[in-house]
Image: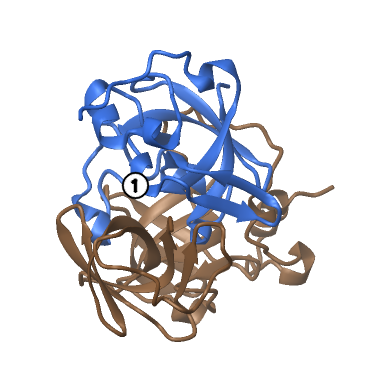
Chain colours: A blue, B brown
Amino acid sequence: MARSQPTDPPIDLLAAVQGEVSWFCCGTAWGPCSTTGKGACGTCNSGSLQHAWPNTSDACWAITHPDTCGFNLSRRTCGFQHKITGLCSGSSVVTAIADCGPQTDLFCGEKSCCGATCAGDRIIDLTPAAYSKIASLSTGLRPCEISTP
Amino acid sequence: MTSRRQMLKSALLGGGAGVVAATALGSLGPEAAFASAKAQEVEPGAPDPNFAEGRIRSIKDNTLLVLGSNMVFHNIRVVDGTSLWKLGPIPFDQAKPGDGLYARGVRMPDGVLAAEAVWLNIVNIKGHIKNITSDKLHLDHNGQEVLCHVVPGKSVAIHSESPPSSDLSMLRVSQHVQILGAWRPDTNEVDIATVFSPH
């Protein structure tokens, strides 16, 4: 059955939302990243302060389906800015949308913790430049809070 | 209080060998090193001058000459307080020409990046497991097969919020995972540091 975007008010319009943050490479790159490309917005680069968002378009939503995990994230398009705060480090970065992702539905129910601080489900991916401002790249996955700057 | 960044900067501007005493900086915990209350200086969406990526062309003394994938050269200075990662923490002499890297630090007036952290060959890829053997995972990453090696004593799996485990036997063919690891330069092979599994 085809799924459609729910019409309830998106939760991230009401308040900051917590979830998992990871990092991905894009743009010109080396290794397995070398074929990644510049992302859905055509501007994505690993060295820029950017992120992927699961609801940049109908086509994007059809791939990521955060609603499967209970997230009704609002439509936000290329260039929209989010503030991401690492719940482990407490540090923040403000980034702009440059790609569609992560594929939230494939990781439903997953939780990431540091000590007793946890957050569940993948709702944002940062470029290496952005992620490394709030955590070491070697952590790979962290709980975070997402808000508007 | 003097910040870690200020110390890096002043140490390099101070001349000499440009070497910062690690004891003066304290330990580099993965979270503590990235905790900063400083206001963001870079416009969201823009390239971050305090970050670099590329592949090492040569190494001279404590400086890595790196050719960025966008064909821009970077001089990255490694000091005693710099953390280096290649499947785990490593000493500087394990950085080799040909290694890919990401580096974060402080861009000096002369263009040198004084590195706080350098991640060598690090990759963080998602995909479906196509096959599993005793010491390898075959990962379908965006339609390309990446051969992921289990490294005894290094590779762990994290199943959701469970603690890291060296037992990778719960991973299953066809499931979706994220693999953090170290690329073997010029191959489609990766040594596994962490497999993140939602179940």
Q: Under tag 1, what secondary structure? A: helix
Residue B29 place in picture, x, y as percent: 67, 63
Give the camera-side residue of A40 and B2. Answer: A40
Residue A127 position by quadrant: top left
Q: Residue at x 18, y 51 (%)?
A: A35
Chain of the residue under the numbered disc 1 shown in the image: A
In the displayed structure, A39 sits above or below B33; it is: above
A63 sits to left or right of B32:
left
Q: Residue at x 65, y 41 (%)?
A: A91
Q: Residue at x 25, y 67 (%)?
A: B173
- The amino acid marked with disc number 1 is Leu
Residue B19 position by quadrant: bottom right
Residue B98 position by quadrant: bottom left
Q: Residue at x 42, y 51 (%)?
A: B52
Residue B117 place in picture, x, y as percent: 55, 60
Residue B116 place in picture, x, y as percent: 59, 58
In the displayed structure, A8 sits above or below A81; it is: above
Residue B41 place in picture, x, y as percent: 58, 32
Which residue is situated farthest in the left direction here? B143
A115 sits to left or right of B126:
right
Quick check: can you spot residue B108?
Answer: no
Q: Which residue is mark 1?
A: A106
Circle 1 crowding by C-alpha within 10 Å: few under 14, some 14–19, many from 20: many
B145 sits to left or right of A116:
left
In the displayed structure, B67 sits above or below A24; it is: below
Quick check: can you spot residue B86?
Answer: yes
Give the camera-side residue of B30 and A1. Answer: A1
Give the camera-side residue of A32 and B48. Answer: A32
Q: Quadrant of the C terminus of chain A?
A: top right
